[in-house]
Structures are given as C-alpha cells and as structure tokens.
Image (cartoon, rainbow, N blue to C red):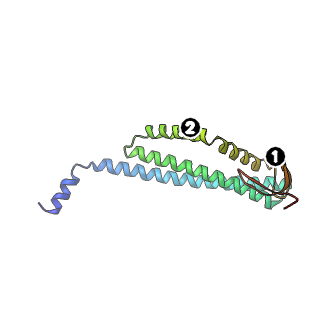
Amino acid sequence: MNLSDKISEWLDPVDWNLVLSSGLRLLLTMVAGFIMMAITGFALRRLKKRLLRRDQVEGEPPSESGKRIETLIRLLRQGLYLSIWIMVILIALNEVGVKIGPLLAGAGVLGLAIGFGAQNLVRDVISGFFIILENQMRVGDVAILNGTGGLVERIRFRTTVLRDLGG
C-alpha cells in the first residue's frame, strides 16, 4: 500500500459538501464580524464628533472635553468590540459542532460569582464612569472628597487624585 492509497483511505469518509458549507458559513461569520466592527467604529466616530460639538456649544474647554470624550469612546469601543467577537466565536463554535449551551451557562455562573466578589469594584467603576460622563469634576477643580480637600490633579474611573495645600 503506497502513500496515495493511505491518504485516499483517510480522506474518503470526509463529507466534502459539509466541510465546504461549514467553511463558507465560518468565513461569512468572520466577514460579518469585521463589518460590525467597521459599523461600530463609524458610529463611535460620529458620536465623538457630536459630543465635541455639544461641548463647544456649552463653552467647555476643548482640551478637557476631548479627554473626557476620548475616555468614554475608548471604553465603549472596547466593550462593543469584545461583544462582537464573543458572538462571532460562539457562532463559529456552534458551526463546528461544539455545544455552546453549557459554555453560556458556565459563563453566566462565573459572571455571577465575579459580580458578587467584585461588587465594590463594579460600583466604583460605574460611579467613575458617570462622574466622567456627567462632567461633575474636572482636572483643575477644587474638591472635597471624604473630608479631604484639594486641587483635582487626575480623574480615573476608580480614583481621583487630589493635591492639598501642603503638597
């Protein structure tokens, strides 16, 4: 038995119509993922321009509003891109025959456990997101937080850095 006979014996049981149709569906799923990323990027660029125009009309300094808006757009972009690719991966796994029901159930349980364990972290991040979104505080403002007052040097989602009179 020569090599070509062994290869032919190994490839004979393969249903090539199924392989081609599944491969085509996988390719279309990937293309749809890239198209969704392009649409998301376009929508986020439009949102950024609209927010910048709104802040100009309200008389906010472009440097401060630009930083805040860039932070928000970056956060939204990461979340949306992650969601798109998780969906693409789940569809691809389903296409190749992996049962995704148990994966989704496991992810739900894991998310619930992390949610209970990291409740304070999630609350701080959401609060920080709304502080930045609503422009409640900006770099250069004087603020009193938990009894400590000073000049706001930096604002992040979980932390605000103040410099008091003593430095």
In this view, the mark in front (1 or 2): 1
Secondary element type, mark 1 = loop
Task: Give the image location of residue 33, x and y in percent.
Answer: 51, 52
Asked if residue 93 can be seen in this view, the reply is yes
State the image quarter where residue 59 is shown.
Answer: bottom right
Tell me: 69 left or right of 20. Answer: right
Asked if residue 58 can be seen in this view, the reply is no
Residue at x 54% of width, y 49% of height:
84
State the image quarter where residue 7 is shown.
Answer: bottom left
Q: Residues within 10 Å of mark 1 (few under 14, many from 20)?
A: few
- In this view, the residue in front, 59 or 140, is 140
Q: Residues within 10 Å of mark 2 (few under 14, many from 20)?
A: few
Lower sequence index among marks 1 and 2: 2
Secondary element type, mark 2 = helix
| Mark-to-mark CA distance, 1 and 2 | 30 Å
- In this view, the residue in front, 137 or 32, is 137
Which label number is shown at residue 157?
none
Residue at x 42% of width, y 50% of height:
26
Which label number is shown at residue 112?
2
Task: Give the image location of residue 92, x and y in percent.
Answer: 43, 48
- In this view, the residue in front, 144 or 70, is 144
Pointer 1 residue? 146
Q: Is residue 9 above or below residue 121?
A: below
Instruction: Assign the C terminus to one quadrant of the image.
Output: bottom right
Task: Give the image location of residue 10, x and y in percent.
Answer: 21, 54
Residue at x 49% of width, y 48% of height:
88
Please, what is the three-letter code of the amino acid marked with disc 2? Answer: Leu
Please, what is the three-letter code of the amino acid marked with disc 1? Answer: Asn
Instruction: Assign the N terminus to one quadrant of the image.
Output: bottom left
Tell me: 122 left or right of 95. Answer: right
